[in-house]
Amino acid sequence: MQQESILIELFGKTPELKVLDFLIDNNIFDFTKTEIAEGAGITRPTLYRFWDKMEKNKLIAKSRKINRTQLYRLNLESATVKKVMEIELKVGLSEIENEKLVRVPVKLRR
C-alpha cells in the first residue's frame, strides 16, 4: 500500500488536493489534462469540475503545445503554490525530526 503524502494526510483526499499533490510531486514535468487526472487518481470529468478554478487561481499554467494538445504544469511562480510547498516541506522535516527523537537505541551483543 502506498503511503499518503503529507499534503493528503494533513488536509484530506479531495480531488483538488490529489491534483495539487500530483503536480507538486512532479513539478519539473508538464502533462495533458488526461495525464493529470490519471496521475492524481481521479476521473477527467471530476478534474473538469474544478479545472477553471485552478487556472483562475494560477495554481497551474499552460506550458506548451504538442500539435493541438495543450500541456500544463504546476505554476511555481504562484505565491500560493510556493506556500503549499513550503508547508509540505516544513511538516515533512518536522516528522523526520520527531522520528529521530522517538528512536530507541538497541544494545548489540558482542
Image (tube, rainbow, N blue to C red):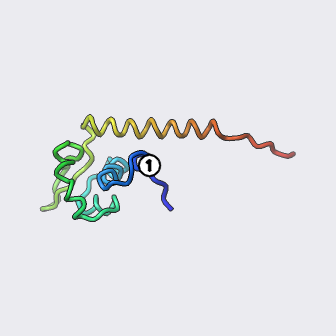
Instruction: Say which residue appears at 29% left-offset and 52% top-offset.
Output: 16
Q: Is residue 13 left or right of residue 16?
A: right
Q: Is residue 57 above or below residue 31?
A: above
Q: Nearer the viewer, residue 58 or 64?
A: 58
Q: Is residue 56 left or right of residue 28?
A: left
Which quadrant is the C terminus positioned in?
A: top right
Residue 29 position, x and y percent, is 30, 51
Instruction: Say which residue appears at 28% left-offset and 58% top-offset.
Output: 36
Where, by quadrant of the figure, is residue 40 drawn?
Answer: bottom left
Residue 58 position, x and y percent, is 20, 42
Q: Is residue 85 left or right of residue 71?
A: right
Q: Is residue 80 above or below residue 32?
A: above
The amino acid pointed to by label 1 is Glu
Instruction: Say which residue appears at 53% left-offset and 40% top-offset.
Output: 95
Q: Which residue is mark 1?
A: 9
Q: Is residue 32 left or right of residue 102?
A: left
